[in-house]
Amino acid sequence: MKLIWTEPAIADRLAIYEWLELKNPAAAAENDVKIADAAARLVHHPASGKTGRIAGTRELVISSSYLLVYEWAAQRVIILAIVHTRRRWPPV
């Protein structure tokens, strides 16, 4: 199984890191490790997320604050977005 990060997901991850880093650099690093670990686990357990709100996607809870939105098909897990749980998802 191959793990692929889309550009929007990479941008989400970077924005989250940069925002947290302003307030607490240690928390930013810890949160980024949680995101990376959650994505890596999907390689071995791609069905671990629940059915997503957008057809064809799945959503994995990373923490009480973030969801990892992904697709799983043809031996690939594609990370589509990292969404704050207070953000409207899917976007209108």
Image (cartoon, rainbow, N blue to C red):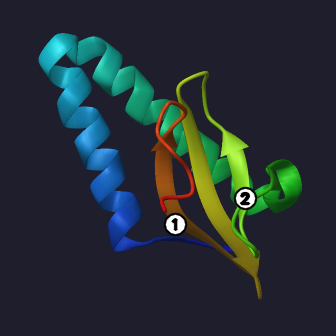
Q: Quadrant of residue 90?
A: bottom right
Residue, x 40% and y 22% (percent of image)? 30
Quadrant where the N terminus is found in the figure: bottom right
Task: Decide if residue 4 is on the left or right side of residue 24.
Answer: right
Residue nearest the viewer, comparing 55 with 7: 55
Residue nearest the viewer, comparing 68 with 2: 68
Tell me if mark 2 has few (under 14), some (14-19) or many (20+) residues whose alpha carbon lies within 10 angstroms of its own: few
- Vertical side of 45 occupied by 76: above or below: below
Residue, x 62% and y 42% (percent of image)? 38
Task: Decide if residue 16 is on the left or right side of residue 37.
Answer: left
Q: Earlier in the sequence, mark 2 or mark 1?
A: 2
- Vertical side of 12 occupied by 21: above or below: above
Q: Amino acid at mark 1?
A: Leu
Residue 12 drawn at (x, y percent): 34, 51
Residue nearest the viewer, comparing 83 with 48: 83
- Vertical side of 44 occupied by 64: above or below: above
- Vertical side of 10 occupied by 84: above or below: above
User: Which label number is shown at residue 45?
Assistant: none
Residue 50 drawn at (x, y percent): 83, 50
Q: Amino acid at mark 2?
A: Arg
User: Which label number is shown at residue 53?
Assistant: 2
Mark 1 = which residue?
A: 80
Task: Count numbered badges in the picture.
Answer: 2
Residue, x 34% and y 15% (percent of image)? 27
Q: Residue furthest left?
A: 22
Task: Decide if residue 47 is on the left or right side of residue 86.
Answer: right
Tell me if mark 1 has few (under 14), some (14-19) or many (20+) residues whose alpha carbon lies within 10 angstroms of its own: many
How much space separates mark 2 and mark 1, taking CA atoms? 13 Å
Residue 80 drawn at (x, y percent): 51, 66
Q: What is the secondary structure assignment of the residue under circle 2?
A: loop
Residue, x 25% and y 23% (percent of image)? 20
Q: What is the secondary structure assignment of the residue under circle 1?
A: strand
